[in-house]
Image (cartoon, rainbow, N blue to C red):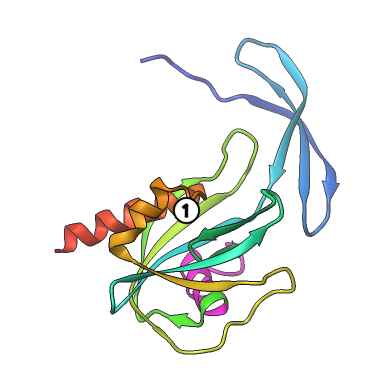
Amino acid sequence: MKNLTKWKLLRSRFVLNNKWCQVRQDEIELPSGQIIDDFFVHVRPNIALVFATTEQQELVFVRQYRHGAGEILLELPAGAFNPAEESGQSAAIRELAEETGYVAEEILELATLYDNPVKDTNSIYLYFAKNVKLASEIQLDITEDIEVVLVPLAEVLLKISNREICVAGSIAAIFLGLDFLNKQQ
């Protein structure tokens, strides 16, 4: 096994620093000794994402416009959170209720993944919620216009194959959630 070494951070400064977007310029020294003075890092909040099933064996999705992709996408409910202020689990419960109106009696962590570790600082916390119930009206942020979509579990993998579901975090949570369900049977 090769002995890998972390890069050495020499200097760091924010070149863009506002509440919607933070970009950091790092000066780093590679293990070879070469210096790179303009390695840019996108400082992003962590994300809590929920694989939530109903008693009718449907998976709860949201369909919404995503400006970065310029597309209307079908994905699992998710949202940003700050670990210093809120746990991933409470963020997952909150986002599920806000975006869909569904509530979970119990929520379990499936995995924590890096989103894009080359240039982004955040992680995606994936959660599983079984037998969620519709309990309230949705409460959307100013940038959200969401349609709640229930998809039978038996149709979810086909929607991935047909590229109707194409958001990486959602796909990871779907495979982990389906595996978790299969192990419980």
Q: Is residue 33 above or below residue 91?
A: above
Q: Residue furthest front?
A: 162
- Residue at the far left: name it: 185
- Estimate the x, y position of residue 20 in percent, counting from the top left: 77, 57
Closer to the camera in the image, 39 or 116: 116
- Occupied quadrant, residue 98: bottom right
Q: Is residue 167 left or right of residue 25?
A: left
Examine the rendering and report whether any part of residue 111 can be seen: no
Q: Nearer the viewer, residue 85 or 105?
A: 105
Magenta residues, dominant SS class: helix
Left or right side of 141 for 59 = left
The span picked out in magenta is 82-98
Point 56% across, 73% down: residue: 147
Total marks placed: 1
For the point 61% across and 24% down, the residue is: 7
Q: Nearer the viewer, residue 182 or 149?
A: 149
Left or right of 53 on screen, residue 82:
right
Q: Position of residue 26 (x, y in %)?
A: 75, 31
Report the front residue among 91 and 137: 137
Q: Quadrant of the N terminus?
A: top left
Residue found at x 28% / y 72%: 57
Q: Is residue 58 visible?
A: yes
Circle 1 is placed at which residue position? 165
Q: Amino acid at mark 1?
A: Ile
Which quadrant of the figure has residue 35? top right
118 in the magenta segment: no
For disc 1, the neighbor class at 10 Å (few under 14, some 14 to 19, many from 20) is: many
Which quadrant of the figure contains the C terminus? bottom left
Residue 141 percent coordinates (x, y) = 69, 74
